[in-house]
Image (cartoon, helix red, strand yellow):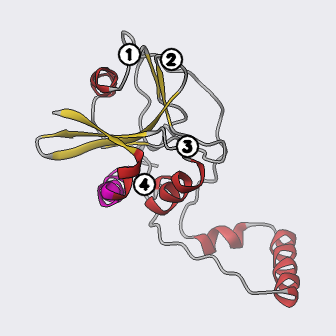
Amino acid sequence: MSWKVYPISEFKNHQDCWRRLNQEGAGSPLLELAFISTMLHAFSSGNEILVCYEGDNTLLAMAVLSPDNRGRWITFQPSQAPLSIWIHRTGVDWPMLLSTLIKKLPGYPLVLGITQQDSDLVPRPQDHGTLKTLDYIQTARISLQGDFDSYWKSRGRRLRQNMRTQRNRHRKRCCNHSLTGKYKARRSRTGD
């Protein structure tokens, strides 16, 4: 079991691994390869690194990290991204991951910051030894029961009418837009 460190330019060689790890774990659209690779293309300075953790020939974790002052590394997260670029399999031990990762980072790292994780996707670890967690913000969320059509029908009549009016105006002025989804509803970890 060990971490491997790659320059960010090699992310393209690990895209299938990222896709598979997200699909088998969190399954978040915010960690989808198309979103991550576009974000890296637009906002990466080139100083970032890709880190991959394998155990028993199985990929268990991946992240993109940025140097942040001397002795400090943080997960890559442009201000436009609601989550940082960190992903790991369910059940993997946070303290073990972080304590082994900090030893593999370039330079003389003293602090490793994993920013903005969604506790519905990744359970929040308990403070333990050198691992400390902080509340940052309460994130907005719309939880859907059933499919989108049922949700949309439950919204107010005026909202639906206003949205239809805006779509029609936009269609007349320039073009027709559509939004399609490909994600299946997942049961929450609490069984809701």
The answer to whether the residues at label 1 and label 2 have Cβ atoms under 8 Å apart is yes
Between marks 4 and 1 in the image, the one whose residue lies nearer the viewer: 1
Q: Looking at the image, which is closer to me, 153 or 71?
A: 71
Q: Residue at x 83, y 69 (%)?
A: 159
- Residue 63 percent across, percent down from the top left: 39, 41
Q: Residue 159 — which label?
A: none
Q: Residue 187 — which label?
A: 4
How many other residues sit within 10 Å of disc 2, few (<14), some (14-19) or many (≥20)?
few
Label 2 vs label 4: CA separation?
A: 42 Å
Q: Secondary structure at mark 4?
A: loop
Task: Identify the residue position indicated by label 3 in the image.
Answer: 45
Label 3 vs label 2: CA separation?
A: 17 Å
Task: Identify the residue position indicated by label 2 in the image.
Answer: 70
Left or right of 78 in this view: 87: left
Q: Quadrant of the N terminus?
A: top left
Q: Earlier in the sequence, mark 4 or mark 3?
A: 3
Label 3 vs label 1: CA separation?
A: 21 Å
How many other residues sit within 10 Å of disc 1, few (<14), some (14-19) or many (≥20)?
few
Between marks 2 and 4 in the image, the one whose residue lies nearer the viewer: 2
20 drawn magenta: yes
The answer to whether the residues at label 2 and label 4 have Cβ atoms under 8 Å apart is no
Q: Residue at x 66, y 47 (%)?
A: 80
In this view, 162 is above or below 143:
below
| Quarter location, residue 82 | top right
